[in-house]
Image: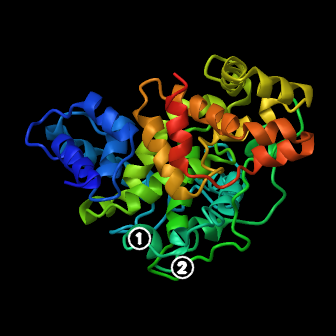
């Protein structure tokens, strides 16, 4: 039996076995070494490792039905315009209790219309970001086979599709940029399409439109955090995995499943995106300090070289850590990295080791380079076999 077939058999034994209880410890061990790109292994493994699904197989059907129904409710309440037409429309009050007394020009704090128009500020940034998501593949520009029926069939009503609402305006950086490091702002997003992705015609929607809706709903449900640029790079790989599931019964619900997996992951990394939590134990400054300390312990020469050049960790590792390396490598490599990161019970310990390995692997170049060359090297990491990086990171125990 080939090594690949043996790996597939191991995943089948854990995920497709007749027993009701999934052995999460064994699943973590398998996933840590990479998930084969066959069947629904990666999508199902991520759902389990992120806590969206419980370890008991018998609970999956009810959990999925409940969560997917809840997400449908989110769309109806948070995405569709106030007073949208429903079955049996014609009453003065729609399904959300928006009556004739709530006029579109109302500026009252409880006005659904006022909220609808005020959403434009962060929706503008979401729209800008998702239209250029993962430019190294064409996936997000393509139409989904499972568009949201209550959104794409507008019945002549403007605003059901979020991109239709976007009104160009000057962005308020306080809402969309993260300036918590007391330094010159570092551009989080480096991989961008040159041209914006186009929207689909009535009855269809592109994958980027689905991602836009996921981020919009997340921002609406988390007003204290809202949308921060870079979240699109976190949700993108998760959605890609869910929407590429070979099992069409799962793929049909990729949007809802992605939303809850993304929400679970954001629950673990939300501190990275909140300025006031930079100095907290789970904040980004603490993460960068841990990386710096590991580098100092593993190779004092590189550490002293970067220190003497005043090339501080935030110049490169801020983006690495905040976006879980999603900007440094092609999407297939990002998926492979996330297999290991998600299966790490300490979650981000191994992420720090990967980042440290990325630096150590470039030892000769870093020691020879001047400041400008090292900045360019670390902010635009050169192509490399990702398995070389991960194998090296495993040795940094």
- The residue drawn where x is 69% and y is 65% is 166
Local secondary structure at mark 2: loop
Q: Is residue 72 left or right of residue 232?
A: left
Point out residue 19 in the picture as x, y percentages from the top left corner: 9, 37
- The residue drawn where x is 65% and y is 50% is 328
The quadrant in which the N terminus is found is: bottom left
Check the image and report above or below for 69 versus 103.
Answer: above
Q: Find disc 1 in the rendering and name its residue.
A: 147
Q: Is residue 244 left or right of residue 248?
A: right
10 Å neighbourhood of mark 1: few (<14), some, or many (≥20)?
Answer: many
- The residue drawn where x is 25% and y is 62% is 247
Q: Is residue 247 visible?
A: yes
Q: Are marks 2 and 1 in contact (CB under 8 Å)?
A: yes
Q: Which mark is residue 200?
A: 2
Rendering quarter of residue 164? bottom right
Which circle's residue, 2 or 1, is located before the other in the chain? Answer: 1
Rendering quarter of residue 325? top right
Check the image and report above or below for 140 versus 173.
Answer: below
Q: Is residue 82 visible?
A: no
């Amino acid at each position: 039996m080939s090594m690949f077939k043996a790996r597939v058999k191991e995943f089948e034994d854990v995920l497709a076995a007749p027993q009701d209880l999934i052995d999460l410890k064994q699943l973590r061990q398998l996933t840590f070494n990479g998930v084969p790109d066959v069947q629904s292994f990666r999508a199902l493994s991520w759902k389990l490792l992120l806590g969206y699904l419980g370890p008991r197989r018998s609970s999956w059907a009810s959990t999925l039905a409940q969560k997917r129904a809840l997400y449908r409710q989110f769309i109806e309440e948070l995405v569709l315009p106030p007073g949208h037409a429903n079955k049996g429309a014609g009453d003065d009050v729609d399904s959300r209790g928006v009556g004739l007394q709530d006029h579109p020009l109302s500026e009252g704090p409880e006005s659904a219309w006022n909220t609808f128009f005020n959403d434009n500020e962060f929706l503008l940034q979401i729209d800008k970001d998702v239209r250029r998501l993962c430019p190294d593949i064409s996936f997000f520009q393509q139409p989904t086979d499972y568009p949201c029926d209550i959104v794409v069939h507008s019945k002549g009503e403007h605003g059901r599709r979020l991109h239709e609402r976007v009104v160009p305006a000057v962005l308020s950086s306080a809402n969309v940029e993260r300036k918590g490091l007391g330094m010159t702002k570092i551009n989080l997003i480096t991989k961008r399409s040159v041209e914006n992705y186009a929207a689909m015609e009535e009855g269809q929607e592109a994958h980027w439109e689905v991602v836009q809706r996921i981020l919009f709903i997340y921002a609406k449900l988390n007003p204290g955090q809202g949308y921060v640029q870079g979240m699109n790079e976190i949700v993108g790989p998760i959605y890609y995995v869910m929407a590429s599931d070979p099992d069409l019964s799962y793929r049909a619900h990729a949007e809802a499943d992605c939303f809850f997996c993304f929400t679970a992951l954001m629950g673990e990394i939300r501190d990275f995106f909140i300025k006031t939590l930079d100095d907290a134990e789970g904040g980004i400054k603490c993460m960068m300090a841990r990386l710096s300390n590991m580098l100092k312990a593993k190779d004092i020469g590189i550490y002293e070289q970067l220190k003497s050049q005043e090339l501080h960790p935030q110049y490169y590792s801020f983006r690495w850590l905040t976006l879980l390396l999603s900007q440094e490598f092609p999407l297939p490599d990002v998926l492979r990295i996330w297999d290991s990161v998600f299966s790490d019970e300490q979650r981000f310990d191994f992420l720090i080791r990967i980042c440290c390995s990325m630096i150590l692997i470039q030892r000769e170049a870093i020691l020879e380079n001047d400041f400008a060359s090292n900045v360019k090297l670390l902010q635009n990491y050169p192509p490399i076999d990702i398995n070389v990086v991960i194998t090296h990171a495993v040795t940094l125990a």
